Image: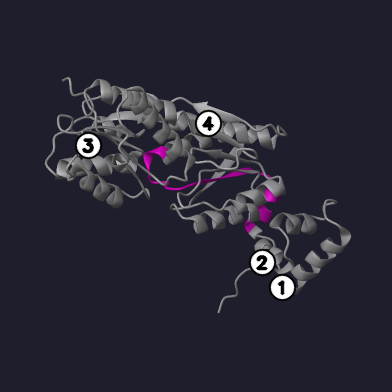
């Protein structure tokens, strides 16, 4: 059987220290004491640890590499963010290696470990939806490895972040639905622990409060970001005795799930149920009726995230929070006046 390659993580676990300490010890860094350096090197020799050959070749050729991890690379939003990152990185002499967490915490952790082993110069990350333990990012902070979050973020006191003004955009979209005659407006979102979900839900609730529309908690459905689950939840809402007359949907997956659900139960858009979705995709203009959308400016977010990362790599240790404004595009799906 093929023997598994010993990693920095294995050495760190055996010695009960951080990956950062092991990495520094193997490099002979003055930040690690002589005794610990000796222990690390002896264990590395005993377990036949060998540095990643790919990473070694990268260092010899001295390319400049950054790692990017996203939750779902096949969606238009994340593809556009990555495009922005790659554009800015290329202009500044960097190459990009991307990883897809598939919305899974364990895969996200493994991708981060791989990036560390490959000695990337920095990382840009968006949290998987089930990530609630941030210890792997705490470790990156201990290592001093530059990292910038975008969209779904954490540890704002340690890392720069690029976000959208989702609260303001949700507020504006909900206002539009109210002005168009809707009163029972549902919000279909993702997991409540995600800061992005909280911001968008807050804007929605503020607009209802300002219009003196009672908040009905049964119209707020926040759960896993999954097309089939969102579709099922929407159908349940639409079949309820007091169904919603409008829907604000959290992202493109949930938006199209809700859009499909409305049509599947025989209701008309927007006459029976208006809908606005957070989505940056061109397809919003090509469905029938054309979908009102809150556009992320995803490409701009990617450029900004890469810009902040390169600042950090070049020695700027200030923590930034960049807010990229969203754009509300009103089309047929939300305007009941037509």
* Residue at mark 4: 303
Q: Residues within 10 Å of mark 4 (few under 14, many from 20)?
A: many
Q: Determine whether label 1 and label 2 are within 8 Å by CB.
A: yes
Q: Earlier in the sequence, mark 3 or mark 4?
A: 3
Q: Earlier in the sequence, mark 1 or mark 4?
A: 1
Spatial distance from mark 1 to mark 4, Cα to Cα?
42 Å
* Residue at mark 2: 10
| Image disc number at residue 47 | 1
Q: Within the image, what quadrant is residue 172 found in?
A: top left
Spatial distance from mark 2 to mark 4, Cα to Cα?
35 Å
Residue 73 counted in the magenta span:
yes
Q: Please determine whether, in this image, residue 322 is positioned above or below residue 241.
A: above
**In the image, residue 157 lies at what x, y percent?**
64, 38
Q: Earlier in the sequence, mark 2 or mark 3?
A: 2
Does dot 4 land on a helix, a strand or a loop?
Answer: helix
Total numbered labels: 4
Q: Nearer the viewer, mark 1 or mark 3?
A: 3
**In the image, residue 323 lies at what x, y percent?**
52, 27
Residue range corresponding to the magenta coloring: 54-77
Q: Nearer the viewer, mark 3 or mark 4?
A: 3
Q: Please determine whether, in this image, residue 72 is positioned above or below residue 87.
A: below
Q: Residues within 10 Å of mark 1 (few under 14, many from 20)?
A: some
Residue at the location (55% across, 28% down)?
322
Q: Earlier in the sequence, mark 1 or mark 3?
A: 1
Spatial distance from mark 2 to mark 3, Cα to Cα?
53 Å
| Image disc number at residue 244 | 3
Residue 305 counted in the magenta span:
no
Where the C terminus falls, by quadrant?
top left
Residue at the location (25% across, 24% down)?
331
Q: Nearer the viewer, mark 2 or mark 4?
A: 2
């Amino acid at each position: 059987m093929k023997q598994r390659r010993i990693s920095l993580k294995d050495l760190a676990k055996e010695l009960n220290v951080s990956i950062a300490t092991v990495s520094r010890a193997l490099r002979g860094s003055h930040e690690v004491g002589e005794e610990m350096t000796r222990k690390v090197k002896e264990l590395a020799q005993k377990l036949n640890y060998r540095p990643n050959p790919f990473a070694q070749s990268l260092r010899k050729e001295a390319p400049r590499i950054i790692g990017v991890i996203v939750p779902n690379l096949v969606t238009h939003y994340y593809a556009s963010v990555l495009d922005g990152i790659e554009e800015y990185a290329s202009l500044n002499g960097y190459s990009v290696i991307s990883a897809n967490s598939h919305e899974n915490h364990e895969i996200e952790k493994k991708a981060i470990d791989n990036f560390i082993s490959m000695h990337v110069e920095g990382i840009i990350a968006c949290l998987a939806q089930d990530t609630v333990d941030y210890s792997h990012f705490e470790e990156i902070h201990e290592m001093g490895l530059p990292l910038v979050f975008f969209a779904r973020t954490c540890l704002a006191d340690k890392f720069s972040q690029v976000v959208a003004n989702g609260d303001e955009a949700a507020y504006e979209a909900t206002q539009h639905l109210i002005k168009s005659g809707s009163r029972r407006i549902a919000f279909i979102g993702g997991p409540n622990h995600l800061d992005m979900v909280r911001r968008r839900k807050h804007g929605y609730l503020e607009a209802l409060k300002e219009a003196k529309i009672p908040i009905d908690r049964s119209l707020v459905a926040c759960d896993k970001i999954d097309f089939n689950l969102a579709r099922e939840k929407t159908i349940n809402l639409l079949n309820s005795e007091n169904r919603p007359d409008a829907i604000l949907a959290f992202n493109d997956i949930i938006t199209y799930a809700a859009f499909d659900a409305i049509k599947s139960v025989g209701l008309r858009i927007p006459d029976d149920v208006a809908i606005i979705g957070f989505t940056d995709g061109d397809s919003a203009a090509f469905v029938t009726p054309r979908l009102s959308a809150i556009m992320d400016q995803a490409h701009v977010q990617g450029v900004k995230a890469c810009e902040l990362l390169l600042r950090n790599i070049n020695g700027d240790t200030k923590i930034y929070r960049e807010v990229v404004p969203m754009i509300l595009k009103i089309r047929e799906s939300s305007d009941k006046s037509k």
